[in-house]
Image: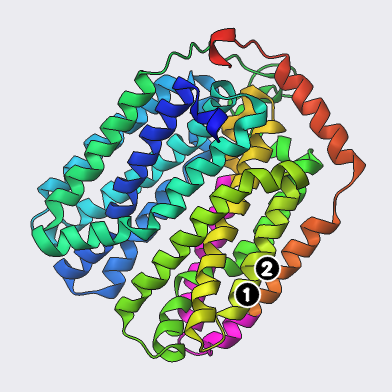
């Protein structure tokens, strides 16, 4: 990590994106609470997060944009557009304009998808291959670790002085993030259309380019098996959005506000996971890190069944660690085993493939929690996620290494200017 932060461009970019996460996390929770205050409806508040998720589903289009344009200008434009969109929330002064909050949150999700794909691709030119794990770990520390303070910051500002400061805070962090990207000394070559975007007749077609990411994953075992494992896991992982409320009320017999304490403990676990992710990955590899993260997640689900506050706290910390390890392993795997001209579409394809079943599992969990004991749901979650961990850990073959070497050779053959690497 010290070596990573010794480089100006890496330090500048990571600092700007980490700061932006504070605004993102604060706004995310505050908008749901704000809609609840304006309407008095839990369903209306829940639609805030649904609108955000729908925005993320434009990921395949985002991937095409990222692979067709230079990533640096895309990041600048996306951050500035997100800042302008967030400022539109300043027009909301009553329940009659709640639709505008939904519209902005949809755009927020779309911008998030574009920024995520562009960032995944840009990092491969910004940092050396052996430091990608460290860079991804640092970004995950910012994303998950700031759960210790950012939700409280957003909710606290909303309760103290209203929504306007939260909106301006998030817009300001987007502007700062755009400024740090503009300050990079990186010079990117103009991306070209790769062979993966060609049709059967050899010509470049829109449909072929659009589907190139998922086709690359499908024919690459090193990427396909982790995707299958994640799809199995997220079919139950969405229950974590509703089960914690029952854990707090029925298991710990605490008030709903106590959930904020557990979320903070999750942030502590994420910080530990970020520190350990890169060293563990260097010793075990990306798929093994993901399998360990899935195993930790299954163990956390089992610990949440208990009515012991120390064990529940340990489970929340373990959940934070597991999310970071899964994300770091997956992102680094994409970066190292995908040709440069396809990274945006592969990242977007995986994001889309995971968001859809996860959204379905969130909805299913909200229904089941009303008729089934949360402990039964936790047992089911632990079983499904443990199975996905076992599947991923047991499916490592020599073909993976051969595919990885081929992908890396293909990536290395892409034009890259020396000013963009260390």
Snapshot quadrant of residue 236: bottom right
Choose between 21 and 110: the one closer to the eye. Answer: 21
Q: Which segment is the magenta one? A: 351-379
Decide: few, some or many residues near mark 1? Use Cα within 10 Å; few <14, some 14-19, many ≥20.
many
Q: Which residue is mark 2?
A: 385
Left or right: where does residue 367 sit relative to residue 90? right
* Vertical relation: 105 (above or below) 251: above
Q: Residue furthest front?
A: 2
- The x and y percentages for residue 316 are 50, 70
Q: Residue furthest right?
A: 398
The reply to whether residue 64 is in sight is no
The reply to whether residue 261 is in sight is yes
- The x and y percentages for residue 209 are 62, 27
Left or right: where does residue 155 sit relative to residue 404? left
Left or right: where does residue 112 sit relative to residue 277? left
Q: What residue is at 54 percent from the left and 80 percent from the top? A: 311
């Amino acid at each position: 990590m010290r070596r990573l932060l010794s480089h100006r461009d890496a330090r500048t970019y990571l600092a700007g994106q980490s700061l932006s996460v504070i605004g993102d996390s604060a706004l995310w929770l505050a908008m749901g609470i704000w809609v609840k205050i304006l309407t008095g409806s839990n369903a209306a508040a829940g639609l805030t997060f649904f609108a955000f998720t729908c925005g993320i589903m434009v990921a395949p289009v985002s991937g095409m944009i990222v692979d067709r344009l230079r990533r640096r200008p895309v990041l600048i434009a996306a951050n500035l557009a997100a800042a302008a969109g967030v400022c539109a929330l300043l027009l909301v002064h009553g329940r009659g304009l709640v639709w505008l909050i939904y519209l902005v949150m949809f755009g927020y999700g779309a911008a998030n998808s574009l920024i995520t794909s562009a960032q995944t691709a840009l990092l491969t030119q910004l940092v050396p291959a052996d430091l990608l794990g460290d860079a991804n770990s640092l970004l995950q520390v910012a994303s998950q670790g700031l759960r210790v303070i950012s939700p409280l910051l957003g909710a606290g500002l909303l309760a103290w002085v209203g929504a306007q400061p939260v909106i301006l805070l998030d817009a300001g962090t987007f502007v700062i993030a755009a400024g740090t990207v503009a300050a990079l000394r990186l010079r990117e070559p103009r991306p070209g259309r790769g062979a993966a975007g060609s049709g059967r007749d050899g010509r470049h077609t829109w449909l072929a380019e659009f589907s190139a990411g998922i086709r690359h994953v499908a024919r690459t075992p090193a990427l396909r098996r982790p995707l299958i494992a994640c799809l199995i896991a997220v079919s139950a992982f969405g229950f974590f959005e509703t089960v914690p409320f029952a854990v707090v009320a029925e298991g710990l017999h605490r008030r709903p506000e106590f959930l904020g304490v557990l979320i903070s403990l999750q942030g502590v676990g994420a910080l530990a996971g970020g520190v350990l992710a890169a060293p563990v990955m260097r010793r075990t590899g990306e798929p093994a890190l993901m399998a360990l993260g899935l195993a930790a997640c299954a163990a956390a689900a089992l610990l949440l069944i208990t009515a012991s506050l120390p064990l529940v706290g340990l489970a929340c910390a373990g959940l934070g660690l597991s999310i970071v390890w899964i994300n770091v392993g997956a992102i680094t795997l994409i970066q190292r085993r995908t040709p440069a001209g396809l990274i945006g579409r592969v990242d977007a394809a995986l994001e889309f493939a995971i968001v859809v079943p996860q959204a379905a599992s969130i909805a299913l969990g909200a229904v089941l929690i009303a008729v089934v004991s949360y402990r039964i749901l936790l047992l089911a979650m632990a079983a499904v996620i443990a199975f996905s961990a076992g599947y991923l850990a047991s499916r490592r073959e020599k073909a993976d290494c051969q595919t990885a070497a081929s992908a890396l050779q293909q990536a290395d053959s892409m034009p890259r200017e020396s000013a963009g690497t260390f």
